[in-house]
Amino acid sequence: TLKDYDVQTQLHRVDYAKAWGLDIQHGTWRDGLLIQAAYMRGQNWRLATRVRNTVPWFDAKQIQASWYLSHNSDRIVGVEPMVRVSIADPNKRSSNEGGMLFTPGFAAYFQGRSRVSANLDMYRSSHDGTFWALRVGTLLYF
């Protein structure tokens, strides 16, 4: 994936930021093991200093693995534990500005594609400490 974003930082001024990414996947949805990985690198226009017309580069990577297990009951057709790790650095020029997100989760699938899931996001910032959030969601398909 190659991107060239046009960014409006001020009224009547448009700048451009370049980025590229790579996504790979092993397995398919609802068929046992699924591994997805992504990497992206580009210019972080939000941190740009126009004094020297320089734009710092960002770096982000993520890997997620899940395992779908069929379950033969009247209501639940499958369960899926998952884990995700994401690491990002918004400014490659500066040390100690990155963060890491670790997410274990679980989903229960019902007839069709409807599901209920719960994830625990644990984020560790290089200088802001550790934060967490429990997320529960549903996807209704009809």
Image (cartoon, helix red, strand yellow):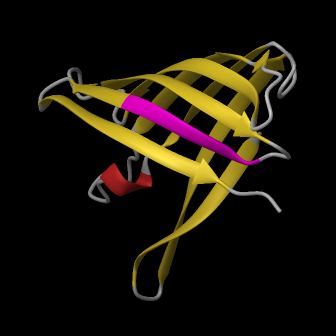
69 within the magenta span: no
Name the residue nearer the viewer: 89 or 93.
Answer: 89
- Residue 68 place in picture, x, y as percent: 75, 19
In the figure, residue 108 lies in which quadrant? top right
- Residue 77 place in picture, x, y as percent: 80, 30
Name the residue nearer the viewer: 116 or 48.
Answer: 116
Residue at 68 percent across and 24 percent down: it is: 79
Residue at 58 percent across and 19 percent down: it is: 82
In the figure, residue 125 lies in which quadrant? top left
- In the displayed structure, does residue 132 sit left or right of residue 18? left
Residue at 45 percent across and 32 percent down: it is: 119
In the figure, residue 6 lies in which quadrant? bottom right
Instruction: Give the residues drawn in magenta, as a range.
Output: 114-120
Q: Is residue 20 visible?
A: yes
- Residue 34 place in picture, x, y as percent: 76, 17
- Image vertical order of residue 121 relative to residue 63, above or below: below
Residue at 70 percent across and 49 percent down: it is: 3
**Quadrant showing the C terminus:** bottom right
- In the displayed structure, does residue 13 sit left or right of residue 120? right
